[in-house]
Image: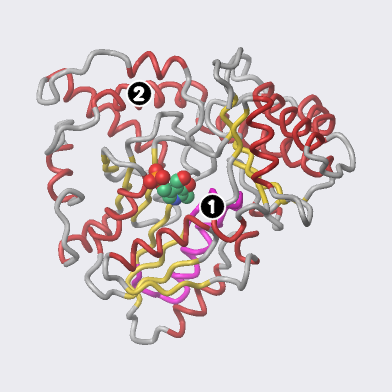
């Protein structure tokens, strides 16, 4: 480690927390106000309303002063009872953590998926969910839980297909979706896809620091909450929603992060959500062209599931991805995501989400290419050149001229 601060700026390319834009940092730095006063109520109403647009819902979105894990717990304890069967799907490390959390709450999660790391290289197979629901003749399964954008792998799942699978079976299970790393970066439609509870976080596509998280709640989920018997106190929607109607919370909310959220929503609306999503798709495609140019494998093997948020890069046999990552960090002040769980050491992750543009991505790819070379990884060619080619031959119509 250096005993002085490296010159220039740090390049934060983990798949969240993503870089916080200066505008948001400045907004957060405003003095904290009285959370029971009139100014706060107006702010509360504005952010609660603006969020609906991002989730594409007409229904309430609950904000918790907690990391995403809190919102995971909130989704389950508000809607389910002790010992309830829930169907979860192993897309990767975060799906596995959500399942473990469900177990700790006294639920009975069943984990669908493919053996080994096969399931960690693609999205959810909705037909497996459909078959399992079909076999559930007694309708014991109370909820289907899936991760929309699996941050540990870079695979995105088709949530509309999961909804159709549930509907084809006429199964009453609630659909709960974690889009903690997908919201405002990958296409997401809470109402249209018939999601009952959507879980999201602040530190990814919303460009905020970590610290607040969300539950978007359907009318069916609200109905389920009336009879759900898992113990809950802090997370209880029934305490929060009535106060939210006037822009307040039953406890002290995270005022300064709500300033930041207000700014983030303003930025997203000005750029236009569709433009934001197209920008992510384009950067992701450029990143993948770099990985192919290096002759390395993209972790996600299904092009239909490629994530617009991050790209997982598999290392050749015998190369420890964490050694490469550490070398890149030390030499180029660039942070990349580590391999998690089953793929620890076998891959690293490049985040290209939130407040990211062409040159930021290119800087990250340059750092990767230099580091891979220094680590002695056998590269087929220059991925940087491929990415440059991709970006210059696929201009994204600028928001300013659109
Ligand atoms: N789910 C997904 C898909 C995530 O990416 C993360 C964090 O990266 C979490 C859940 C957990 O959220 P948190 O770390 O904010 O508690």
Query: Residue 391's image quarter?
Result: top right
Image mark for residue 21 = none
Q: Residue at x 80, y 27 (%)?
A: 388
Magenta part of the protein: which range? 147-173
Residue placed under numbered mark 1 in the picture: 150
Whichever of labels 2 and 1 marks the residue nearer the N terminus, that label is 1
Q: Position of residue 273 (x, y in %)?
A: 50, 32
Q: Quarter-wise, where is residue 302 in the image?
A: bottom right
Considering only vertical position in the picture, is 254 above or below 289?
Answer: above
Label 2 vs label 1: CA separation? 25 Å
In the image, residue 200 sits, relative to residue 353, either above or below, namely: below
Image position, residue 186 (x, y; %): 54, 42
* Residue annotated with mark 2: 260
Quarter of the image containing the C terminus?
Answer: top right
- In this view of the protein, can residue 180 be seen by the observer? no
Mark 1 crowd level (few <14, some 14–19, many ≥20, 10 Å Cα): many
Q: Is residue 252 left or right of residue 24?
A: left
User: Which is nearer the eye, 32 or 173?
Assistant: 32
């Amino acid at each position: 480690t250096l005993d002085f601060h490296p010159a220039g700026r740090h390049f934060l390319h983990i798949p969240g927390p993503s870089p916080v834009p200066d505008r948001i940092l400045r907004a957060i730095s405003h003095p904290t106000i009285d959370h029971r006063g009139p100014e706060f109520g107006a702010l509360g109403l504005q952010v609660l309303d603006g969020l609906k647009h991002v989730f594409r819902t007409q229904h309430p979105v609950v904000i918790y002063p907690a990391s995403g894990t809190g919102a995971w717990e909130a989704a389950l304890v508000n809607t389910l009872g002790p010992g309830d069967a829930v169907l979860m799907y192993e897309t990767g490390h975060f799906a596995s953590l959500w399942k473990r959390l469900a177990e700790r709450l006294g639920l009975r999660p069943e984990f669908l998926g493919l053996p080994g790391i096969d399931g960690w290289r693609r999205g959810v197979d909705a037909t497996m969910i459909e078959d399992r629901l079909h076999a559930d003749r007694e309708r014991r399964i109370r909820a289907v839980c899936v991760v929309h954008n699996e941050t540990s792998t870079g695979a995105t799942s088709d949530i509309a297909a999961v909804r159709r699978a549930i509907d084809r079976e006429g199964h009453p299970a609630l659909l709960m979706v974690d889009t903690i790393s997908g919201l405002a970066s990958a296409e997401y439609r809470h109402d249209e896809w018939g999601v009952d509870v959507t879980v999201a976080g602040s530190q990814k596509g919303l460009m905020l620091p970590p610290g607040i998280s969300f539950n978007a709640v359907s009318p069916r989920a609200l109905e389920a909450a009336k009879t759900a018997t898992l113990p809950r106190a802090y997370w209880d929607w029934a305490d929060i929603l009535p106060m939210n109607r006037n822009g307040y919370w039953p406890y002290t909310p995270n005022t300064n992060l709500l300033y930041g959220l207000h700014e983030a929503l303003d930025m997203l609306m000005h750029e236009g959500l569709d433009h934001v999503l197209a920008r992510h798709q384009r950067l992701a495609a450029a990143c993948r062209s770099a990985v192919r140019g290096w002759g390395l494998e993209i972790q996600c093997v299904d092009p239909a599931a490629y994530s617009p948020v991050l790209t997982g890069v598999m290392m050749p046999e015998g190369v420890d991805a964490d050694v490469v990552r550490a070398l890149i960090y030390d030499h180029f002040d660039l942070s990349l995501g580590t391999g998690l769980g089953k793929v620890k050491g076998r891959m690293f992750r490049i985040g290209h989400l939130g407040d990211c543009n062409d040159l930021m991505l290119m800087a990250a790819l340059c750092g990767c290419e230099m580091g891979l070379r220094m680590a002695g990884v056998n590269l087929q060619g220059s991925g940087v050149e491929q990415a440059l080619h991709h970006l210059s031959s696929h201009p994204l119509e600028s928001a300013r001229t659109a």
